[in-house]
Amino acid sequence: DAKTTQPTSMDCAEGRAANLPCNHSTISGNEYVYWYRQIHSQGPQYIIHGLKNNETNEMASLIITEDRKSSTLILPHATLRDTAVYYCIVRVEGGADGLTFGKGTHLIIQP
Amino acid sequence: EAGVAQSPRYKIIEKRQSVAFWCNPISGHATLYWYQQILGQGPKLLIQFQNNGVVDDSQLPKDRFSAERLKGVDSTLKIQPAKLEDSAVYLCASSLGRTSEEQYFGPGTRLTVT
């Protein structure tokens, strides 16, 4: 799987949109971008994934650049409960391997 | 739907002692994973099971770690003997199958080796 690069930490005001960037410049054509988050003292939780089109679900939106070398996870109206470590992972969909986590971005939502 | 269950939640042992962790995956999930998460790092895959067979154990320190999933349902991970550097959170995850999009994680077991 390709490596990803994320900022170590970010702050965001409660109620504002949180935009979390991820670089994956060596991504292959059949690799998807996955996002998981880990709230303190809990296991990671799946958020969203996509290939090249923008994706949206009840939790977040995923914007992938046209060249697929970077992406942004958007939490539209951040709440204090969104404070967590967010992991960007590149993986072949349908791949049979476990997940390869980096260090992620520690997102802190400020009241 | 019940989530992935793990026990115990916390364990403190002395180095050279042995310890075992238990995981019960979501009902019907064929694939089970054990991850190790050292403080400040992301989880690292230790072993992956498909039903009761091992798919990938390339990152499992086999001289001291062992895992089994005898009936293709729950699983145990054992460390014997423990070292100080084994202090970590041990996470169990499950998915419907090996190619599933989403893995579901349990709350983890925090191990402290003194």
Image (tube, coloured by chain):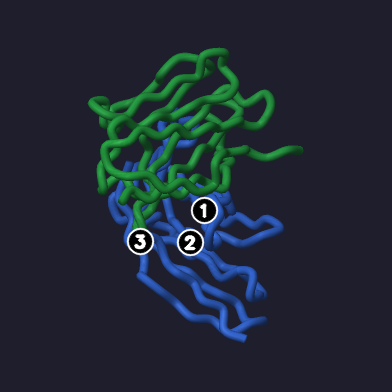
Chain colours: A blue, B green
Per the image, label 1 sits on a secondary structure element best described as strand
Is disc 1 in contact with disc 2, using a CB cutoff of under 8 Å?
A: yes
Q: Are marks 1 and 3 on the same chain?
A: no
Above or below residue A12? Residue A68 is above
Residue at the outermost right position: B1
Q: Nearer the viewer, residue A77 or B5?
A: B5
Picture disc at residue A14: none
The residue under the point 43% across, 27% down is: B48
Badges 1 and 3: C-beta atoms under 8 Å apart?
Answer: no
Q: Amino acid at mark 3?
A: Gly
- The answer to whether residue A78 is visible is no
Q: Percent x, y for residue A108? A: 51, 76
Quadrant in the picture for residue A97 = top left
**Classed neighbour count for the residue bearing mark 3: other residues with Cα under 10 Å, few (<14), some (14–19), many (≥20):** few
Q: Is residue B49 left or right of residue A76?
A: left
**Residue A67: percent from left, percent from top:** 38, 56
Q: Which residue is mark 2?
A: A86
Whole-angstrom CA distance, mark 1 to mark 2, is 6 Å
Q: Residue at x 38, y 43 (%)?
A: B36
Total residue callouts: 3
Label 3 close to label 2 by CB (< 8 Å)? no
Residue ID for mark 1:
A36
Which type of secondary structure does the marked residue at label 2 adopt? Answer: strand
Looking at the image, residue B41 lies above or below residue B48: below
Q: Secondary structure at mark 3?
A: loop
Whole-number angstrom distance, CA of label 1 to CA of label 3: 16 Å
